[in-house]
Amino acid sequence: MQSILYKVQEIAKDVVAPAAEATDRDARWPRQGIGALQQAGYGGLVVPCAYGGNGHGLLALAKVCELLGQECASTAICYGMHCVGSSVIAANATPDQRERFLTPICAGRHITTLSLSEAGTGAHFYLPQTTLEAVSDEVYGLTGSKTFVTNGGHADSYVVSAVAASPAAPVGQFSCVVLPAGTEGVKWGADWDGLGMRGNSSRTMELHGARIPRNNLLGKEGDQIWYIFNVVTPYFLIAMAGTFLGVATTALEEARRHLSRRYHTHVGASLAQAPVLQHRLGSLWAVLERTRRLTYHAAASFDAGEPDALTAVMAAKVEVADCAVSLVNEAMTLCGGIGYRNGARLHRLLRDARAAHLMSPTTDILRIWIGRALLGQPLLSD
């Protein structure tokens, strides 16, 4: 893993960082950064070695997204979502799916992502209304609308969730399928124009009877909930946690640099010499470091197959969201007017960090799930 992290850090500094301002300003999908990661051989970071991937799990994903997030949160989440989609495809891949999807993913020729959220069910991303209809023995048809599709319009495939259209199917038979880019019957909404995370191309996907081969079904019909809690949720939460750890780390560094170089001539001392500011910076460092350690612990626990790992993963995303928003706010206060001006790095970090609470599963939903897990209650009891 260490050699991968060294190379990712190099890509983050040399490729991602120089493009970060334009990515944010122009809401530009980070093609260069994603391409550099693919070219370096990390398209299959979380794909098993047996399928041609790097064979890593959540801990590597957390650390890679953190390094990328230090320079550009949009690049980090776009790459993270590709890894989440890859992990879903790899979880129960058939030989045909390995050849058509995982081989090009690992070779750096294919970007994938998730397409789960819908306007009608909001943060309850695990309850799709998009329908999956058996058109023939060989073809499915997809009809519905997906929202906030990260990498929308730029990926080569999309992991789409849907519910069985047949009245004879069991109630709530949710399934996951792979939708190739360019499939007839797919229409994209307007370009993403968000407050923050502006490069992630989080677009709306309209599905009008889009037809896909039945062998694009992941697992069996009705397996979506298994994927949600065994693959989607842990990988997505850790990708987000790593991304926003990176944002918080950069905010802390911005504050440290400002305090170190700012000199007040009227008292003949730098801000770094003020005890109250030393105290505040030290407190922020401690919050960030304990949040980072929780995230690494949760990721390593999941990789090791520990029974309570998912609860720790959920808690990690919650704590990182609180940490990132709070730390960027405090860093801006420590930097004063210099940090508040339009175009300052903290300006972008503040806008990006705010998304941490909003991206599903939201902070509120996760807190409920954590409580239910601790009390032995079903997570989806409502």
Image (tube, rainbow, N blue to C red):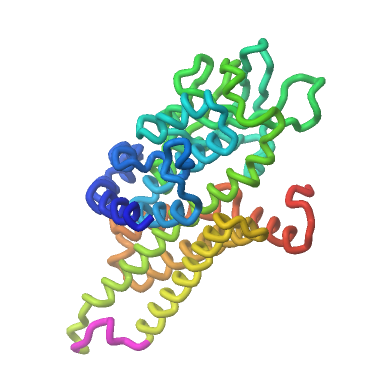
State whether residue 128 is above or below residue 355.
above
Q: Is residue 273 magenta?
A: yes
Report the front residue among 306 and 168. 306
User: As drawn, which residue projects farthest toward the top?
Assistant: 136
Depth order, front residue of 18/55? 55
- Range of the magenta residues? 268-275
Q: Residue at x 62, y 17 (%)?
A: 141
Q: Is residue 55 visible?
A: yes
Residue, x 39% and y 59% (percent of image)? 246
Residue 369 lies in the magenta stretch: no
Quadrant of res 163: top right
The residue that appears at 39% across and 50% down in the rendered structure is 73
- 200 shown above or below 172: below
Give the number of marks: 0
Instruction: Give the residue at the far front of this rendering.
Output: 50
Which quadrant: the N terminus? Answer: bottom left
Residue 270 position within the rendered picture, expressed as x and y whole percent measured from the top left: 23, 83
Q: Is residue 237 above or below residue 138?
A: below
- Locate residue 160, reporting x and y percent: 58, 30
Residue 226: x %, y % from top left: 68, 41
Q: Is residue 154 visible?
A: no
